[in-house]
Image: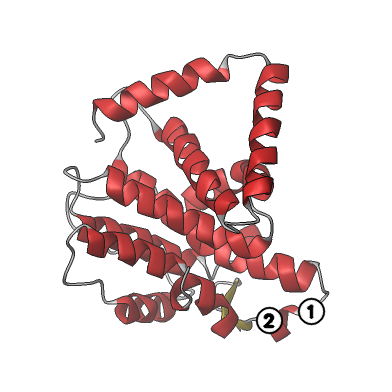
Amino acid sequence: MFGNFFKKKLATDHHHEKEPDNKSDLIFETMMTAINEKRKVDPLIGAKIGSKEIVQHLIAALRTDKGVHIESLLSALGALAGYACQASIRAELIEAKGVAENAVFAVANCVDGRKYYFGDLLNKPLAESQYSVWSLAAGAAQQLGVKDMLDLEGVFGYVTDSIGGENFGVPRIPEGHTPSDLPINFLKIHWPKLMPLIRRFCAQPSEWPVLFGLAIQEVLYMGQGTIDPAVALSIAMESAIPMSKVDLEAF
């Protein structure tokens, strides 16, 4: 569980939520004006600030009377980060430009009746670019002292092998660190609620995975002394990779 720092922060956030809507809207619009001005020198400023907002929203959503379960927070962020990779590509190519789905993704139709998505375009924001979810999360883990890095290829292999089966989307989590729910359930609950906020902070869909990668970074740093950063990284990526491939409407 997170400590007193998070309880104090959540109490402050709860107080802010009681402000009149018109005042909150004015504050938000003023902040967005400042962000848009700063984009000239830092194109990712929206994703950076938005990542902090997303973390606080999820902390508030996941808190109990005992605090916030960090494993659940990491799994939720991982699930959202993975799906954001797919959703951003859909928004940019399929929705905005009318490119056919099978020209964007390699589509697998499985025995469970669902479709799953693969391909180089999907892997880039997930694990291959400078600002990919993996690069941002692993970079934070390294700064926190992790030397034996997660076997990312092994995670991809496990996900691919489990497509369409009962083990798909079930993270391999060390004993004592099991999240409170499966990644798909975190995704179904929180993605629709957070999308309007994500769109407001990000200038373009390609920033969506960056925002969540930065959010994972922040929670890795927050979790120092609470969870082994190697375990934290594993939870995030074991949740992100399968959720990058799902047809969310079919689950």
Q: Is residue 167 left or right of residue 246?
A: left
Identify the element where label 1 is drawn. Answer: loop
Residue at 21 percent of width and 57 percent of height: 144
Where is 132 relative to 52, above or below?
below
Residue 217 in percent (x, y) is at 37, 54
Identify the element where label 2 is drawn. Answer: helix
Residue at the extreme front of the image, as rendered: 41
Amino acid at the residue labelled 2: Val
Residue 74 in percent (x, y) is at 36, 50
Residue 75 in percent (x, y) is at 38, 52
Residue at 46 percent of width and 78 percent of height: 128
Amino acid at the residue labelled 1: Val
Where is 51 relative to 6, above or below?
below
Q: Quadrant of the N terminus?
A: top left
Residue at 34 percent of width and 21 percent of height: 8
Where is 22 relative to 84, above or below?
above
Mark 1 touches mark 2? (CB < 8 Å)? yes
Query: How far separated are the C-alphas under marks 1 and 2?
Result: 7 Å
- Please tell me which residue lies in front, 88 or 142: 142
Asked if residue 60 shows in the view, the reply is yes
- Which residue carries the number 2 mark? 104
Where is 29 relative to 245, above or below?
above
Residue 49 in percent (x, y) is at 53, 44
Q: Which mark is residue 186?
A: none
Q: Is residue 34 left or right of residue 69?
A: right
- Which residue carries the number 1 mark? 99
Residue at the extreme right of the image, as rendered: 98
Corner quadrant of residue 101 = bottom right
Q: Quadrant of the C terminus?
A: bottom right
Corner quadrant of residue 35 = top right
Asked if residue 109 shows in the view, the reply is no
